[in-house]
């Protein structure tokens, strides 16, 4: 669950739109809605899924829950909500266990026994889903309504011990802020007027929830100061979040000589009846600029992870491993010997926004050494968070067979 949609996934999945009123309601209303849609989904399953474990005459089902909101995870199936994000502004729930809240909602749905077997972040789910099929997956990234990442850390401090000697680091990178980010007056304006001013700065520059709104604000200012669409600013152009990133991507993808798709979107969304080709070209250019910035920022963050885990192909002095001429037995060469690295990607921006994906991939390879670029694979993990949650739920099932 994260952004304006929730997913219920087994071997098939259903995308469920969360009513906007629930984003501003109570936690009980939200989780009751999720539980009801979960039950509706279960009722559609065929006889091949009716087998299961029984307890006191009831069939017990287990699920994996992915959460995109910041949580303090205290075990594999408990986590305290730190704060609501991504447009959610719910009065309660902060400081409570998200698993317990969902479990209570499901318990209120009579006739079904469902247990939350595991709680994970969506990025961890994406990486787990990818790693199930490919051992080279070292990074999981969400580029969608929100944005986040996690990676496998092999160089653990001495005071942290794990069985494998590795640990998954969940970054919450959407909250990153630095004076070095290319923030403009539009970003400051959007942040100040958001439900969470001062928070999630990087996400507000790269997440699909915000890209269309950034374009709208740029066009509104151009209409006001340069009469982009005539002598007055179109009324609907003043309406926040009226331009979805999906509609923005349609305009950006328009390759027709007269930019007729741009013209159609301007009519349908902003009720701008007539535009000149020169105006449509400006709109197209704004979409391109906003998308390129977001994509290259995302790429820089991905390369930052690769640098942290020693997979970027550069030594400490910034020299590419391709350029090193060292003895065959050199320890330095051994350190620079690169392994294949797979980055598992999920999210609507990467999957459906073609130009965003092209810009991001190009920037990643531009920042890496040639040696690292040859060893890197960026791979779509479609609904990877749901798949990963299912896999991890099976691993933590109370009914999983034990082997001596």
Image: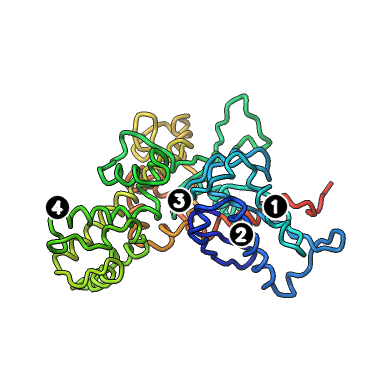
Residue 284 spot, x, y in % from top left: 23, 62
Q: Residue at x 44, y 43 (%)?
A: 174
Residue 334 spot, x, y in % from top left: 48, 34
Label 4 secondary element: helix
Q: Which is nearer the N-term, disc 2 or disc 3? A: 2
Tell me if 154 is positioned left or right of 177 in this view. right
Label 1 secondary element: helix
Q: Which is nearer the N-term, disc 4 or disc 2? A: 2
Q: Give residue 87's mark.
A: 3
Residue 363 spot, x, y in % from top left: 33, 49
Label 2 sits on residue: 34
Label 4 sits on residue: 225
- Towards the viewer: 102 or 343: 102
Q: Which is nearer the N-term, disc 2 or disc 1? A: 2
Tell me if 322 is positioned left or right of 345 in this view. left
Residue 30 spot, x, y in % from top left: 58, 55
Tell me if 261 is positioned left or right of 274 in this view. right
- Which scheme is used to colour this image of the protein? rainbow
Q: Is residue 165 above or below residue 236?
A: above
Q: Residues within 10 Å of mark 2 (few under 14, many from 20)?
A: many
Q: Is residue 318 above or below residue 212?
A: above
Q: Residues within 10 Å of mark 3 (few under 14, many from 20)?
A: some
Measured Cα–Cα span from mark 3 to mark 1: 23 Å
């Amino acid at each position: 669950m994260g952004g304006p949609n929730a997913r219920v996934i087994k071997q098939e999945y259903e995308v469920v739109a969360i009513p906007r009123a629930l984003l501003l309601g109570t936690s009980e209303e939200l989780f009751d809605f999720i539980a009801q849609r979960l039950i509706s989904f279960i009722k559609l399953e065929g006889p091949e899924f009716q087998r299961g474990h029984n307890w006191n005459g009831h069939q017990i089902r287990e699920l994996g829950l992915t959460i995109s909101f910041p949580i303090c995870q205290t075990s594999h199936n408990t986590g305290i909500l730190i704060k609501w994000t991504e447009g959610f502004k719910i009065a309660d729930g902060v400081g409570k266990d998200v698993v317990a809240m969902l479990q209570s909602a499901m318990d209120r749905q009579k006739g079904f026994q469902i247990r939350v077997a595991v709680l994970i972040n969506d990025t961890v789910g994406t990486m787990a889903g990818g790693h199930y099929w490919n051992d080279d997956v070292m990074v999981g990234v969400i580029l969608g309504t929100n944005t986040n990442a996690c990676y496998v850390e092999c160089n653990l401090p001495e005071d942290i011990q794990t069985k494998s000697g590795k640990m998954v680091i969940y970054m919450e990178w959407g909250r990153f802020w630095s004076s070095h980010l290319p923030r403009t007056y539009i970003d400051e304006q959007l942040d100040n007027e958001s439900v969470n001013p001062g928070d999630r700065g990087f996400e507000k520059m790269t997440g699909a929830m915000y890209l269309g709104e950034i374009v709208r604000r740029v066009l509104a200012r151009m209409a006001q100061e340069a009469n982009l669409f005539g002598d007055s600013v179109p009324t609907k152009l003043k309406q926040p979040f009226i331009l979805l990133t999906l509609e923005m991507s349609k305009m950006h993808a328009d390759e027709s000589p007269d930019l007729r798709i741009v013209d159609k979107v301007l009519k349908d969304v902003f009720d701008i009846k007539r535009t000149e080709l020169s105006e449509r070209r400006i709109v197209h250019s704004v979409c391109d600029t906003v998308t390129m910035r977001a994509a290259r920022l995302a790429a820089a963050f991905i390369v930052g992870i690769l640098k942290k885990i020693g997979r970027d192909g550069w030594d400490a002095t910034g020299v590419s491993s391709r350029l090193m001429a060292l003895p065959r037995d050199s320890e330095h060469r051994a350190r620079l010997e690169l392994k294949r690295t797979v980055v598992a990607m999920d999210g609507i921006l990467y999957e459906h926004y073609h130009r965003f994906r092209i810009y991001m991939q190009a920037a990643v390879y531009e920042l890496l050494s040639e040696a690292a670029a040859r060893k890197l694979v960026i791979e779509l993990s479609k609904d990877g968070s749901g798949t990963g949650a299912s896999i991890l739920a099976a691993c933590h099932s109370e009914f999983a067979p034990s082997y001596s």
